[in-house]
Structures are given as C-alpha cells and as structure tokens.
C-alpha cells in the first residue's frame, strides 16, 4: 500500500510533519512518499493521496482545485478544499452560529470605527498580502486596499488579545482532538508579512474547555470527510474564543508539539487504506 503526501516544488521532500508521518506509517507497513502536486505524477497509482505541504497553491488556486478534482482518492477531499481555500467560508460559519472574528467583505474604504484593523485577501496563505493598520495610517491602508483590487478582500478588527495570548491552534485527527499549539503574534503595525510560510514562533499549549467547544462547533458546521483539521482561535472582543481560521487544506500540524500525534495521524491514514 502506497500513500502520496502531496507537497510543493519548494519542498520536494515534504514538510517536517510529512517526515514524521512517513516514519510512523512505515511502522504500520505503509509506504508514504512525498510527491509535488503539480508534477506529472500518476495519482491513480497511489492507494491514497493526502494533501500536506502544497503551500504554493494560492497563486494558482484554480489550477490547484482542478488538480484536486482529478485525484481519485484524496484527503481532505476536493469539495472540502474548494470550500476551504477561500476564506469566505468564515461567512458560512458565522451564518451557522459559529463565533468568528468580525469581518467586512470588499469594503469601499478602510474602517473609521476600529482603532486597529487587518486587511487581507480571502485567498492567501502564510499571511501574504496581509497587513495591520491603525488610526492615522489611512492613506497607506487605502493603498493596500487598492493593491488587492480584483480579489475578494477581508477587513477585520485587530483584537488586542492576540498580542497578549497569540493564536491557539487546535489540531484534530479523524474528528478527534489531538493536541494544541500556541502561535506567537506575527503582524506588526503598518507592515505586511514576508518570510517563512507559517511564520511566528510556535510552542505547545493546553486547550481550554471553551476553546474545545468552539472548535468542535466549527467542525460540526463542515460537510465532508475530514482526515485532519486545524482550528485557529483568538480571544474575541469580550475575551471568549473566536475562530480566526479553519485550516482544512494544507495546515502545518505542529506534530512536534503533540506527543504521539504523528502516530495518531499515521494510524488514521492507514485505516483509510
């Protein structure tokens, strides 16, 4: 049995997560190999294809989704990827009662009622095209807004709890909670983010009951078979956790911060074969 771990050309050997999963799968007698998603691979030759570090898809989203549609046995499945690669899914979650970061879509101008706010495109990864602004920086913020013209744009308040608590990522495997990690703030005022795709220091964390409840509520609102999921939460305006992002496409799984997590994900993959 052979599993392809889909990656990108910049990481032909796969991410650190993929290395750990390959090692754990080998113990179960499953051969897992990293394969670049936009290569000429024969995807039908694999018993299963697991999307992992396809971190360059945002510049070619239509091509990536067409590829996903063409792969016969893909996890997470193509319909989930189609929904999740555009952050307008946050609007769907909000309509289904999930607490999310307040968001304005394609606004005509920068907000005048928020002291600090974030402007970003709805299709992006690694915070590329994203910047944090504050009152008094309207001209630069408007230029940023104009630079994203032609793409769906999101504007969100910058929540002060992010600076004190960071983001908490809750990782799920086959619908079950696996582990949590804390991501340090990465957005400085008046700047975009460049560098590593996932930026920001990551440390182990313990999920609170309130965070688990919100994460499970978000996952319950998703239709589709989820091998893996990452729910990124931040403290909302009143301090309660709200969803910043629901990562179902190619999230870093932070396996190094969850003892036994690589084995859990490997066993979930092996069970699908």
Image (cartoon, rainbow, N blue to C red):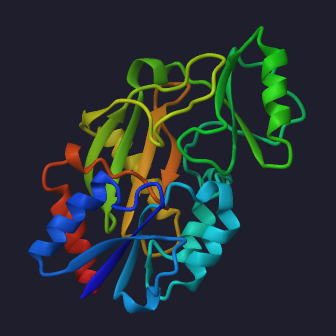
Quarter of the figure that contains the N terminus: bottom left
Q: Is residue 229 above or below residue 242?
A: below
Task: Report the residue that reaches farthest toward the top.
Answer: 136
Quarter of the figure that contains the C terminus: bottom left
**Residue 23, position as x, y percentages in the image:** 16, 65
Residue for point 41% across, 56% down:
11
| Depth check, front residue: 20 or 8 | 8
Q: Is residue 38 left or right of residue 36?
A: right
Q: Is residue 136 above or below residue 159?
A: above
- The number of numbered badges drawn on the structure is 0
Residue for point 44% across, 91% down:
44
Q: Is residue 192 above or below residue 219?
A: above
Task: Report the residue that reaches farthest toward the right.
Answer: 108
**Residue 178, position as x, y percentages in the image:** 25, 55
Q: Is residue 149 above or below residue 71?
A: above
**Residue 213, position as x, y percentages in the image:** 38, 48
Residue for point 62% across, 65% down:
83
């Amino acid at each position: 049995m052979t599993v392809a771990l889909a990656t990108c050309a910049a990481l032909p050997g796969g991410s650190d997560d993929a290395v750990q999963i390959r090692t754990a799968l080998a113990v179960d007698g499953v051969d897992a190999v990293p394969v670049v998603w936009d290569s000429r691979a024969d995807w039908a030759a694999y018993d299963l294809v697991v999307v992992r570090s396809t971190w360059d898809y945002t510049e070619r989203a239509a091509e990536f989704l067409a590829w996903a549609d063409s792969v016969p046995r893909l996890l997470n499945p193509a319909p989930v990827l189609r929904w999740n690669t555009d952050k307008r899914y946050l609007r769907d979650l909000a309509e289904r009662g999930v607490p999310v970061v307040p968001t304005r879509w394609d606004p005509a101008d920068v907000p005048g009622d928020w002291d600090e706010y974030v402007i970003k495109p709805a299709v992006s990864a690694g915070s590329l095209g994203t910047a944090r602004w504050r009152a008094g920086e309207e001209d630069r913020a408007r230029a940023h807004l104009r630079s994203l013209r032609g793409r769906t744009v999101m504007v969100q308040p910058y929540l002060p709890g992010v600076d004190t608590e960071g983001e908490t990522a809750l990782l799920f495997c086959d619908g079950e909670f696996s582990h949590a990690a804390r991501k340090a703030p990465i957005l400085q005022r008046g700047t975009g983010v460049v560098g590593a795709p996932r930026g920001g220091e990551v440390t182990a964390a313990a999920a609170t009951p309130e965070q688990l409840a919100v994460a499970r509520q978000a996952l319950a609102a998703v239709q589709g078979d989820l091998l893996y999921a990452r729910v990124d939460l931040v403290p909302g305006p009143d301090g309660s956790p709200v969803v910043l992002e629901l990562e179902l496409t190619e999230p870093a799984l932070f396996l190094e911060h969850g003892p036994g997590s690589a084995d859990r994900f490997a066993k979930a993959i092996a069970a699908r074969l």
